Amino acid sequence: MSDARPNPVDPSVVDVDVLAGWMDARNLGVGPLTDLTPLAGGTQNLLLRFVRDDRTYVLRRPPEHKRKNSDETMRREARVLDALAGSNVPHPGLIAAESDVDVLGAAFYLMEPVDGFTPTTGLTEFHSGDPAVRRAMGFSLADAAAALGRIDYQSVGLDGFGKPDGYLERQVPRWRSQLDSYAELGGDWTPDIPHLDEVGEWLDANRPDTFVPGIIHGDYHFGNVMYRYDSPDLAAVVDWELATIGDPLIDLGLIIAFWPEEDGVPTAVSITPWEGFPTVGELIARYGEGSTRDVSAAAWYGVLACYKTGIILEGTHARAMEGKAAKEFGDMLHATTVGLFRKAELLIRNA
Protein backbone atom coordinates (compact mmCIF):
# COMPACT_ATOMS: atom_id res chain seq x y z
CA MET A 1 0.00 0.00 0.00
CA SER A 2 2.98 2.30 0.13
CA ASP A 3 3.86 2.23 -3.58
CA ALA A 4 2.22 5.04 -5.52
CA ARG A 5 1.06 4.61 -9.09
CA PRO A 6 1.60 7.58 -11.41
CA ASN A 7 -1.88 7.56 -12.98
CA PRO A 8 -4.27 10.36 -11.91
CA VAL A 9 -7.34 9.77 -9.78
CA ASP A 10 -10.45 9.06 -11.82
CA PRO A 11 -13.26 11.12 -10.25
CA SER A 12 -15.82 8.74 -11.74
CA VAL A 13 -14.50 6.01 -9.46
CA VAL A 14 -14.07 8.14 -6.31
CA ASP A 15 -16.09 11.36 -6.14
CA VAL A 16 -13.90 13.36 -3.79
CA ASP A 17 -16.56 16.00 -3.18
CA VAL A 18 -19.05 13.37 -2.03
CA LEU A 19 -16.34 11.74 0.07
CA ALA A 20 -15.51 15.09 1.69
CA GLY A 21 -19.17 15.60 2.58
CA TRP A 22 -19.35 12.10 4.05
CA MET A 23 -16.28 12.88 6.16
CA ASP A 24 -17.80 16.20 7.28
CA ALA A 25 -20.75 14.32 8.76
CA ARG A 26 -18.33 12.20 10.78
CA ASN A 27 -16.08 15.03 11.97
CA LEU A 28 -13.14 13.68 10.00
CA GLY A 29 -11.37 16.97 9.35
CA VAL A 30 -12.37 20.00 7.34
CA GLY A 31 -11.48 21.45 3.98
CA PRO A 32 -10.52 19.87 0.65
CA LEU A 33 -8.95 16.48 0.06
CA THR A 34 -5.40 17.00 -1.23
CA ASP A 35 -2.39 14.96 -2.37
CA LEU A 36 -4.65 12.35 -3.95
CA THR A 37 -2.43 9.35 -4.74
CA PRO A 38 -3.59 5.96 -6.01
CA LEU A 39 -1.59 3.15 -4.37
CA ALA A 40 -0.49 -0.24 -5.59
CA GLY A 41 -2.44 -2.80 -3.63
CA GLY A 42 -3.24 -5.71 -5.88
CA THR A 43 -5.58 -5.91 -8.84
CA GLN A 44 -8.88 -6.52 -7.08
CA ASN A 45 -9.48 -3.31 -5.13
CA LEU A 46 -8.74 0.39 -5.30
CA LEU A 47 -6.57 2.19 -2.76
CA LEU A 48 -6.43 5.97 -2.61
CA ARG A 49 -4.24 7.92 -0.22
CA PHE A 50 -5.07 11.54 0.49
CA VAL A 51 -4.59 14.29 3.05
CA ARG A 52 -7.25 16.31 4.81
CA ASP A 53 -6.67 18.81 7.57
CA ASP A 54 -3.06 17.60 8.03
CA ARG A 55 -4.11 13.97 8.51
CA THR A 56 -3.35 11.22 5.99
CA TYR A 57 -6.04 8.69 5.09
CA VAL A 58 -6.22 5.65 2.83
CA LEU A 59 -9.55 4.79 1.19
CA ARG A 60 -10.19 1.22 0.12
CA ARG A 61 -13.08 0.29 -2.15
CA PRO A 62 -13.84 -2.26 -4.89
CA PRO A 63 -12.70 -1.62 -8.46
CA GLU A 64 -14.88 0.32 -10.87
CA HIS A 65 -16.19 -2.91 -12.36
CA LYS A 66 -17.23 -4.74 -9.23
CA ARG A 67 -17.52 -8.47 -8.73
CA LYS A 68 -20.77 -9.90 -7.41
CA ASN A 69 -19.50 -10.01 -3.82
CA SER A 70 -17.28 -6.91 -3.88
CA ASP A 71 -19.38 -4.78 -1.54
CA GLU A 72 -19.86 -7.55 1.01
CA THR A 73 -16.11 -8.17 0.90
CA MET A 74 -15.49 -4.53 1.82
CA ARG A 75 -17.95 -4.76 4.71
CA ARG A 76 -16.27 -7.91 6.00
CA GLU A 77 -12.80 -6.38 5.74
CA ALA A 78 -13.91 -3.34 7.72
CA ARG A 79 -15.53 -5.55 10.33
CA VAL A 80 -12.42 -7.65 10.91
CA LEU A 81 -10.12 -4.59 11.06
CA ASP A 82 -12.46 -3.08 13.63
CA ALA A 83 -12.30 -6.32 15.64
CA LEU A 84 -8.48 -6.28 15.58
CA ALA A 85 -8.25 -2.79 17.12
CA GLY A 86 -6.11 -2.92 20.24
CA SER A 87 -4.76 -6.39 19.50
CA ASN A 88 -1.10 -7.27 19.01
CA VAL A 89 -1.78 -8.32 15.41
CA PRO A 90 -0.20 -5.63 13.21
CA HIS A 91 -2.86 -4.30 10.87
CA PRO A 92 -4.04 -1.05 9.24
CA GLY A 93 -6.06 0.94 11.75
CA LEU A 94 -9.70 1.35 10.73
CA ILE A 95 -10.90 4.97 10.83
CA ALA A 96 -14.46 4.73 9.51
CA ALA A 97 -16.51 2.53 7.18
CA GLU A 98 -19.57 2.89 4.96
CA SER A 99 -21.71 -0.09 4.01
CA ASP A 100 -24.25 1.85 1.89
CA VAL A 101 -23.34 1.58 -1.79
CA ASP A 102 -25.30 4.73 -2.61
CA VAL A 103 -22.61 7.03 -1.19
CA LEU A 104 -19.73 6.27 -3.57
CA GLY A 105 -21.25 3.51 -5.66
CA ALA A 106 -19.65 0.83 -3.50
CA ALA A 107 -19.05 -0.02 0.13
CA PHE A 108 -15.75 1.45 1.33
CA TYR A 109 -13.70 2.29 4.37
CA LEU A 110 -10.99 4.66 5.50
CA MET A 111 -7.89 3.39 7.28
CA GLU A 112 -4.61 4.67 8.61
CA PRO A 113 -1.68 4.62 6.18
CA VAL A 114 0.94 1.94 6.76
CA ASP A 115 4.57 3.03 6.94
CA GLY A 116 6.19 -0.04 5.47
CA PHE A 117 7.06 -2.05 2.37
CA THR A 118 6.00 -5.33 0.80
CA PRO A 119 9.04 -7.66 0.67
CA THR A 120 8.06 -9.29 -2.62
CA THR A 121 8.63 -5.96 -4.38
CA GLY A 122 12.21 -5.81 -3.10
CA LEU A 123 14.04 -5.55 0.20
CA THR A 124 15.51 -2.37 1.60
CA GLU A 125 19.27 -2.11 2.08
CA PHE A 126 18.75 -2.72 5.79
CA HIS A 127 16.89 -5.99 5.16
CA SER A 128 18.92 -7.22 2.20
CA GLY A 129 22.29 -6.59 3.83
CA ASP A 130 22.02 -8.82 6.89
CA PRO A 131 20.97 -12.51 7.00
CA ALA A 132 20.15 -12.12 10.71
CA VAL A 133 17.57 -9.46 9.86
CA ARG A 134 15.98 -11.75 7.28
CA ARG A 135 15.87 -14.57 9.82
CA ALA A 136 13.96 -12.29 12.18
CA MET A 137 11.64 -11.30 9.31
CA GLY A 138 10.59 -14.92 8.94
CA PHE A 139 9.89 -15.30 12.63
CA SER A 140 7.87 -12.06 12.62
CA LEU A 141 5.62 -13.56 9.95
CA ALA A 142 5.01 -16.65 12.08
CA ASP A 143 4.50 -14.57 15.24
CA ALA A 144 1.74 -12.46 13.69
CA ALA A 145 -0.10 -15.54 12.45
CA ALA A 146 0.08 -17.07 15.92
CA ALA A 147 -1.13 -13.82 17.48
CA LEU A 148 -4.14 -13.76 15.16
CA GLY A 149 -4.97 -17.33 16.12
CA ARG A 150 -4.90 -16.43 19.83
CA ILE A 151 -7.72 -13.90 19.55
CA ASP A 152 -11.08 -14.99 20.97
CA TYR A 153 -13.20 -14.12 17.94
CA GLN A 154 -16.43 -14.02 19.90
CA SER A 155 -15.10 -11.54 22.45
CA VAL A 156 -14.13 -9.08 19.67
CA GLY A 157 -17.54 -9.17 17.99
CA LEU A 158 -16.94 -11.69 15.20
CA ASP A 159 -19.52 -14.26 16.22
CA GLY A 160 -21.32 -15.25 13.02
CA PHE A 161 -18.47 -13.96 10.82
CA GLY A 162 -17.86 -17.47 9.51
CA LYS A 163 -19.13 -21.05 9.74
CA PRO A 164 -16.59 -23.02 11.76
CA ASP A 165 -18.79 -26.13 12.09
CA GLY A 166 -17.58 -28.66 9.54
CA TYR A 167 -14.95 -26.21 8.27
CA LEU A 168 -12.19 -28.74 7.61
CA GLU A 169 -14.58 -31.34 6.20
CA ARG A 170 -15.77 -28.84 3.59
CA GLN A 171 -12.35 -27.93 2.24
CA VAL A 172 -11.53 -30.65 -0.29
CA PRO A 173 -15.03 -30.93 -1.84
CA ARG A 174 -15.37 -27.15 -1.93
CA TRP A 175 -12.14 -26.60 -3.86
CA ARG A 176 -12.52 -29.64 -6.09
CA SER A 177 -15.97 -28.35 -7.03
CA GLN A 178 -14.43 -25.01 -7.96
CA LEU A 179 -11.85 -26.74 -10.15
CA ASP A 180 -14.55 -28.76 -11.90
CA SER A 181 -16.53 -25.58 -12.55
CA TYR A 182 -13.78 -24.27 -14.84
CA ALA A 183 -14.90 -26.75 -17.48
CA GLU A 184 -18.06 -24.65 -17.84
CA LEU A 185 -15.93 -21.90 -19.41
CA GLY A 186 -15.68 -23.98 -22.56
CA GLY A 187 -12.53 -24.21 -24.62
CA ASP A 188 -9.88 -26.92 -24.40
CA TRP A 189 -9.04 -26.72 -20.69
CA THR A 190 -8.71 -29.93 -18.72
CA PRO A 191 -7.23 -30.21 -15.21
CA ASP A 192 -3.70 -31.26 -16.22
CA ILE A 193 -2.37 -31.11 -12.67
CA PRO A 194 0.02 -33.72 -11.25
CA HIS A 195 -1.09 -35.68 -8.17
CA LEU A 196 -4.50 -33.93 -8.20
CA ASP A 197 -6.60 -36.89 -7.07
CA GLU A 198 -3.92 -38.32 -4.80
CA VAL A 199 -3.56 -35.05 -2.90
CA GLY A 200 -7.30 -34.69 -2.40
CA GLU A 201 -7.62 -38.28 -1.22
CA TRP A 202 -4.71 -37.88 1.22
CA LEU A 203 -6.23 -34.72 2.65
CA ASP A 204 -9.55 -36.45 3.30
CA ALA A 205 -7.88 -39.51 4.80
CA ASN A 206 -5.58 -37.54 7.12
CA ARG A 207 -7.81 -34.63 8.14
CA PRO A 208 -7.37 -33.53 11.79
CA ASP A 209 -10.26 -34.65 13.96
CA THR A 210 -10.84 -31.40 15.83
CA PHE A 211 -9.76 -27.76 16.00
CA VAL A 212 -10.45 -24.66 18.06
CA PRO A 213 -12.18 -22.03 15.88
CA GLY A 214 -10.51 -18.68 15.42
CA ILE A 215 -9.83 -15.88 12.95
CA ILE A 216 -8.21 -16.80 9.65
CA HIS A 217 -6.59 -14.26 7.33
CA GLY A 218 -6.99 -16.71 4.46
CA ASP A 219 -4.24 -15.47 2.12
CA TYR A 220 -1.30 -15.24 4.47
CA HIS A 221 2.11 -14.90 2.79
CA PHE A 222 4.86 -12.37 2.09
CA GLY A 223 2.81 -10.67 -0.62
CA ASN A 224 0.14 -9.67 1.90
CA VAL A 225 2.28 -8.26 4.69
CA MET A 226 4.28 -5.07 5.05
CA TYR A 227 7.50 -4.72 7.02
CA ARG A 228 8.84 -1.74 8.88
CA TYR A 229 11.69 0.07 7.16
CA ASP A 230 13.84 0.18 10.29
CA SER A 231 13.41 -3.34 11.70
CA PRO A 232 12.50 -6.93 10.79
CA ASP A 233 9.09 -6.50 12.44
CA LEU A 234 5.80 -6.45 10.55
CA ALA A 235 4.22 -3.05 10.06
CA ALA A 236 0.87 -4.58 9.05
CA VAL A 237 -0.90 -7.62 7.68
CA VAL A 238 -2.98 -6.36 4.74
CA ASP A 239 -5.63 -7.56 2.26
CA TRP A 240 -8.14 -9.17 4.60
CA GLU A 241 -10.72 -9.97 1.91
CA LEU A 242 -10.60 -13.75 2.56
CA ALA A 243 -10.78 -13.46 6.34
CA THR A 244 -13.26 -15.75 8.08
CA ILE A 245 -13.75 -17.93 11.15
CA GLY A 246 -12.38 -21.45 10.91
CA ASP A 247 -9.15 -23.23 11.79
CA PRO A 248 -6.35 -20.63 12.21
CA LEU A 249 -3.73 -23.26 11.36
CA ILE A 250 -4.85 -22.61 7.79
CA ASP A 251 -2.60 -19.53 7.89
CA LEU A 252 0.36 -21.60 9.09
CA GLY A 253 -0.32 -23.92 6.17
CA LEU A 254 -0.16 -20.99 3.77
CA ILE A 255 3.23 -20.01 5.17
CA ILE A 256 4.42 -23.56 4.54
CA ALA A 257 2.99 -23.70 1.01
CA PHE A 258 4.56 -20.42 -0.09
CA TRP A 259 7.88 -20.87 1.72
CA PRO A 260 10.85 -21.38 -0.62
CA GLU A 261 12.92 -24.42 0.26
CA GLU A 262 16.01 -25.99 -1.25
CA ASP A 263 13.96 -28.70 -2.93
CA GLY A 264 13.82 -27.35 -6.45
CA VAL A 265 10.05 -26.81 -6.29
CA PRO A 266 9.01 -23.32 -7.47
CA THR A 267 6.86 -21.21 -5.19
CA ALA A 268 4.30 -18.52 -5.86
CA VAL A 269 6.16 -15.96 -3.76
CA SER A 270 9.89 -15.25 -3.85
CA ILE A 271 12.31 -12.88 -2.12
CA THR A 272 15.91 -12.07 -2.96
CA PRO A 273 18.29 -12.58 -1.23
CA TRP A 274 16.90 -15.60 0.61
CA GLU A 275 19.91 -16.55 2.74
CA GLY A 276 19.15 -16.24 6.46
CA PHE A 277 15.42 -16.94 6.42
CA PRO A 278 14.34 -19.73 8.81
CA THR A 279 13.47 -23.22 7.60
CA VAL A 280 9.87 -24.39 7.53
CA GLY A 281 10.55 -26.56 10.56
CA GLU A 282 11.79 -23.56 12.50
CA LEU A 283 8.70 -21.56 11.53
CA ILE A 284 6.36 -24.33 12.64
CA ALA A 285 8.19 -24.52 15.98
CA ARG A 286 8.03 -20.74 16.37
CA TYR A 287 4.29 -20.70 15.69
CA GLY A 288 3.85 -23.46 18.24
CA GLU A 289 5.73 -21.45 20.87
CA GLY A 290 3.23 -18.62 20.47
CA SER A 291 0.11 -20.77 20.35
CA THR A 292 -1.72 -23.40 22.36
CA ARG A 293 -2.71 -25.13 19.11
CA ASP A 294 -1.32 -28.54 18.19
CA VAL A 295 1.05 -28.04 15.26
CA SER A 296 1.87 -31.74 14.87
CA ALA A 297 -0.33 -31.88 11.74
CA ALA A 298 1.28 -28.77 10.19
CA ALA A 299 2.12 -30.69 7.03
CA TRP A 300 -1.58 -31.41 6.45
CA TYR A 301 -2.34 -27.69 6.51
CA GLY A 302 0.56 -27.06 4.13
CA VAL A 303 -0.81 -29.64 1.70
CA LEU A 304 -4.28 -28.11 1.92
CA ALA A 305 -2.84 -24.65 1.21
CA CYS A 306 -1.07 -26.01 -1.89
CA TYR A 307 -4.29 -27.72 -3.02
CA LYS A 308 -6.52 -24.70 -2.47
CA THR A 309 -4.13 -22.09 -3.89
CA GLY A 310 -3.24 -24.19 -6.91
CA ILE A 311 -6.90 -24.65 -7.78
CA ILE A 312 -7.61 -20.93 -7.42
CA LEU A 313 -4.69 -20.03 -9.72
CA GLU A 314 -5.73 -22.65 -12.26
CA GLY A 315 -8.91 -20.66 -12.84
CA THR A 316 -6.94 -17.97 -14.65
CA HIS A 317 -5.24 -20.62 -16.78
CA ALA A 318 -8.66 -21.99 -17.76
CA ARG A 319 -9.89 -18.51 -18.63
CA ALA A 320 -6.74 -17.87 -20.66
CA MET A 321 -7.35 -21.01 -22.72
CA GLU A 322 -10.80 -19.64 -23.49
CA GLY A 323 -9.28 -16.28 -24.52
CA LYS A 324 -10.63 -14.47 -21.44
CA ALA A 325 -7.20 -13.78 -19.92
CA ALA A 326 -3.68 -13.25 -21.26
CA LYS A 327 -2.11 -16.54 -22.35
CA GLU A 328 1.30 -15.69 -20.88
CA PHE A 329 -0.24 -14.91 -17.51
CA GLY A 330 -2.36 -18.05 -17.57
CA ASP A 331 0.66 -20.17 -18.47
CA MET A 332 2.68 -18.64 -15.64
CA LEU A 333 -0.04 -19.35 -13.08
CA HIS A 334 -0.48 -22.89 -14.37
CA ALA A 335 3.23 -23.47 -13.81
CA THR A 336 2.78 -22.17 -10.27
CA THR A 337 -0.15 -24.54 -9.76
CA VAL A 338 1.96 -27.47 -10.94
CA GLY A 339 4.72 -26.40 -8.56
CA LEU A 340 2.29 -26.20 -5.65
CA PHE A 341 0.96 -29.70 -6.29
CA ARG A 342 4.49 -31.04 -6.54
CA LYS A 343 5.22 -29.39 -3.23
CA ALA A 344 2.06 -30.97 -1.80
CA GLU A 345 3.29 -34.38 -2.93
CA LEU A 346 6.68 -33.72 -1.34
CA LEU A 347 5.05 -32.67 1.94
CA ILE A 348 2.97 -35.86 1.90
CA ARG A 349 6.06 -38.04 1.36
CA ASN A 350 7.86 -36.30 4.21
CA ALA A 351 4.89 -36.24 6.61
Image: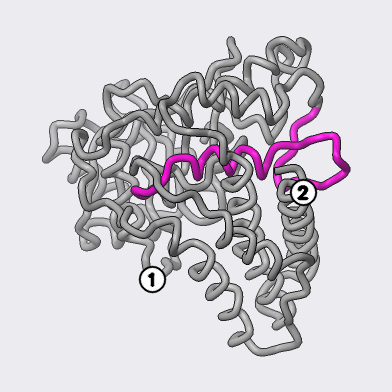
Crowd class of label 2 (few under 14; some 14 to 19; many from 20; radius 10 Å):
few
Mark 2–mark 1 distance (CA, rounded to whole Å): 40 Å
Report the label total: 2
Q: Which quadrant holds residue 325?
A: bottom right
Indicate left or right for 84 with 89 as reference.
left
Amino acid type shown at disc 1: Lys
N-term mark: 2 or 1:
1
Residue at the image position 36 percent from the left and 27 percent from the top: 56
Amino acid type shown at disc 2: Arg
Q: Position of residue 138 (x, y in %)?
A: 64, 23
Q: Nearer the viewer, mark 2 or mark 1?
A: 2
Residue under pointer 1 = 68
Q: In this rendered view, identify the residue nearer to me: 215 or 62.
A: 215
Residue under pointer 2 = 349
Residue at the image position 72 percent from the left and 29 percent from the top: 122
Indicate left or right for 20 with 233 as reference.
left
Q: Is residue 259 magenta?
A: yes
Above or below, 177 against 167 in this view is below
In the image, the segment drawn in magenta is: 243-272
Q: In this rendered view, identify the residue nearer to me: 240 or 122.
A: 240
What quarter of the picture does the C terminus occupy?
Answer: top right
Residue at the image position 51 percent from the left and 25 percent from the top: 288
